[in-house]
Image (spheres, rainbow, N blue to C red):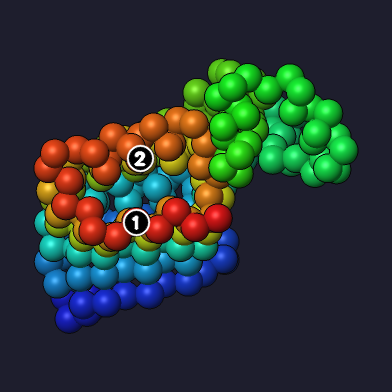
Amino acid sequence: LLDCVKHLFVASDGEDAEGLVVRLAAALRVNLSLKSIWLLIPLKLEAVRALGQALAVNDALNKLCLSGCKWDLKTMGGDDDNYDTDPYGTDTDDEYMESSRFLSSDDEEEAAFGLDKKKSFYTDPSIAEQVLQLPQAFAEGLRHNTSLRTIDLSSCELMDEVLAIILQALVGHPALEHLDISRNRAGRESIRALAELVGHPQSTLMTLNLGE
């Protein structure tokens, strides 16, 4: 059926949502007709890994939209005891002003640009390392991809480390023209990776949306 389709939108929050993405990724590995895909599905470990593997070998897809997809990091390693449920804080203005007295110069610069003060959802480094295996698998697919011209990762609530890994994989991408990473948790690491991406001598990027 997909051999006749050029543009595909898939939305699901059911129990088999992950299996749906895995099956779609398997088809994408051999499909040459699909030009754009928009997924609106909670992304878990196997789904993102399968999608990355498909992107590595597919040379026909031009647009990948994951806008609004929630990367279910809590399923990728660790329990609630290691998970910061409010990593970006609900401090009052007075509390923020008090804490700002202890910021380094780099932290002050990040705060001035509205960047997040905390870097990771996970307080346990071993858990954080395990969690980062997921975006690394996805990034590996992007690193080998040569056809994507538009990537939309807006509103995915990606934390700084995850976003940085993805952006680093896109450095030197031969076709990427439009990138949307707005409404994520950009911080120091992802901004550095973004600077490398934009400043690459072979960069083909034409539009970049950072948003809020």
Q: Tag on residue 36? A: none
- Residue ID for mark 2: 194
Total residue callouts: 2
Q: Residues within 10 Å of mark 2 (few under 14, many from 20)?
A: many
Residue at the image position 50 percent from the left and 26 percent from the top: 130
Q: Is residue 76 visible?
A: no
| On-image quarter of the C terminus | bottom right
- Give coordinates of residue 82: x percent, y percent: 70, 27
Q: Mark 2–mark 1 contact, CB under 8 Å? A: yes
Q: Amino acid at mark 1?
A: Leu
Q: Position of residue 109 (x, y in %)?
A: 57, 32
Secondary structure found at label 2: helix
Residue type at the position of mark 2: Leu
Query: Which residue is at a point 49% across and 31% down the rendered structure image?
Result: 188
Looking at the rendered image, the quarter that the N terminus falls into is bottom left
Horizontal arrangement in the rendering, residue 127 relative to residue 139 (left or right):
right
Quadrant of residue 21 in the image? bottom left
Whether residue 105 is situated above or below residue 67 in the rendered picture: above
- Marks 2 and 1, how far apart in space? 10 Å
Residue 156 at what x, y percent from top left?
Answer: 52, 54
User: Looking at the picture, does residue 48 appear above or below residue 5?
Assistant: above
Label 1, on which residue?
A: 208
Picture layout, residue 189 above or below residue 126: below
- In terms of depth relative to the viewer, which is nearer, 161 or 13? 161
